[in-house]
Image (cartoon, grey):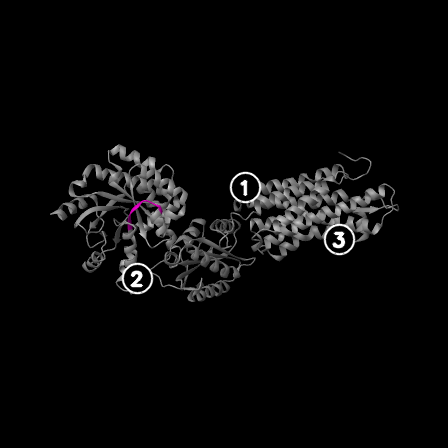
Amino acid sequence: MFYPTGRYNLNFDFGAILLDAILLIFYLLRPRIIRERRTRTFLILLFTLSLSAVSEVCASICRNIMGEGIPIDLGILRISTFFSHFFHNSLPFTLCIYLYEVIGITHRTSRRTYILLSIPEVIMIVFLFIPPLRTLVYYFTNTGEYMHGIIYIQLYVAIHVFYLSLSLFTVISYRKALLPPEYISILVVVIGFGLSMIPMVINQYMKITIFLQSLLVMIICIILESDNDQFESSTGLRRRYALWKDVRQCFETRNKASVISVKISSLSYYRMILGTLTIRHLEKMIGTWLQQFASDKIRVYHTQEESYAILFYQIDEDEVRKIAGKIQLRFHEEWNCDEAPVFLTTQIWIGAIPDQITDEDQMNVFIDSPYDERLPENTLHFQNNMAPQQRMKDVEFSLQHAISNNSLEVFYQPIFDTRDSRIHSCEALVRMKDEKGGYFAPDEFIRVAEQTGMINRLGIMVFEKMVSFLAEEKPEQYGLDFVEVNLSPVQCMDPQLADQLTEILSLYHVPASKICLEITESAVIHNETAMRSAIEKLGAAGFSFALDDFGTGNANYSYVMKYPFQIIKIDKSFLWGAEKDENTRIILTNMLSLVKSLKRHAVVEGVESEQQRDFMISCGVDYLQGFYYSKPVPRDRFINFLMNFRV
């Protein structure tokens, strides 16, 4: 409803005050409000909007009262009117600065640029503050009636058009630094701020502008300031997703940055010994300690189970190394976790963006590269060249070529039954040749396959080659009961997996009972709901299951009891470690005893000598696997091995 008689409609302003108060309470009471420049800038935007609504209500009430002939203190009217104009005309400037923070260009924006950016805002303040100039914007008659000056509309429109146009230009220029929902929401907000001026220009008594702007800021609060996908509830650190967003902005806005990657090797061991809950408490301790380095220019992330990262914006290289050194020294000390001393071994890598890490793919490789056992522990390492990243690209290209040409090979490694001294099963292992006629390391190209989304095609190809081997060679005539084949954690998340595997079995007329599916610990805990569903479907189809690499990940004996694993495969590191360390020997023998007590069969991997074989047999192990019997070999050589072994 319009008020042509000169009485101001305050309904929308009261609604704006209520909405702004709700937004402020919601934002300030968030469980994790990070003390950084972007947060402070958004709070300034919220407070500016709130004070704009409050001061406008005060000024309009005074004018309405005076319009009814009731005397009122002119000082209150003048003060509230001044602040109403000041806060309202400061909103576009504050919004522009906030969007600079969202896009991520403030880290390389100079002080001179900010000074130039503030000139229109300063001019506006000068016109409002100095009385002779203020009368050009607004003034009061002798009777106290409020009137617009000759440049009121021009100043109002000029301020809004300048900052909103600059915001729009900046957002469009750096749109690749934003996710699509962020980009669209910012466009809506900026354009909406511009359109919200129209009612005020058309009818000064219809106070709806601030309410519309409050609705637009609510969009910012919901979409841009929601941190549910940014922070972990357990550690309080930023997630890997947040790192990916921030790094992407660095590349798109040409920000120079440094990154530290902290890789921990022994956390999975302690998880098995101390339990998952205790290790979660330890991860929170580590996160809290690392968070002390966080600031406007430093962000801390928990990128995966045994890896942390710290991103530095425009920080001197010496300062980065200094912080890396402090982290290294801290990990030399023990962590007191529920009164149990825990010692963690780490490797700390330092890289520079974009000098050494030039794109997002290389950043992913830098972060995801596992703890390298070949390198010394608890030391600093520097990413001085891109050879490892180039290697990953070469592996990815070779893998694409091998899958397209169906040139992947499947080798077979025998598994020895200690009870009746025969080869009762084998493990199918994928191999991929390189350009020189050798072979890529399986861990290398399988990791690339998982990262690039090719793992499902690779897994199905390996499974079909293995089923073809069973159908054509009929190894059961040489005493082989079944073949074990690995499932990637990514494959296990595919709801169509069971249908795909059974279709291949039907094509070759091979029963599912001839195949045992090996599932790693990481697959078990990655998504327990999806894993349970996959195992139920595959079990109903007739497959049996083995838990692979037991003892190296995060699973424990509760997983052994909950899932139908007939076979538990003990990682080779325990057998090799038992030869050198009495504690590892005790752990290994206890693991074997528990597996047997749970009425499961144990397969010990890595048997390479007669002494290791005899030791395992003395421990009552059912099955042994390792180079002592045979390396993984192609199908023809494996059939010859089976024939000769029987003889």
Residue mark closest to the camera, 2 vs 3: 2
Residue picked out by circle 3? 126
Determine contact: label 2, label 3, CB under 8 Å: no
Tell me which amino acid carries mark 2: Thr
Identify the residue at horizontal 84%, vertical 50% (top origin).
Answer: 74
Residue picked out by circle 2? 584
Q: Quadrant of residue 148?
A: top right
Q: Which residues are magenta?
A: 562-568
Residue picked out by circle 1? 181
Tell me which amino acid carries mark 1: Pro
> How packed is label 3: few (under 14 Cα within 10 Å), some, or many (20 or more)?
few
Q: Where in the figure is residue 544, as x and y percent of width and height?
A: 28, 42
Q: Which disc number belongs to residue 168?
A: none
Judged from the image, the secondary structure of the residue bearing numbered disc 3 is: helix
Residue 349 visible in this rendered orientation of the protein: yes
Q: Earlier in the sequence, mark 1 or mark 2?
A: 1
| Residue 336 among magenta residues | no
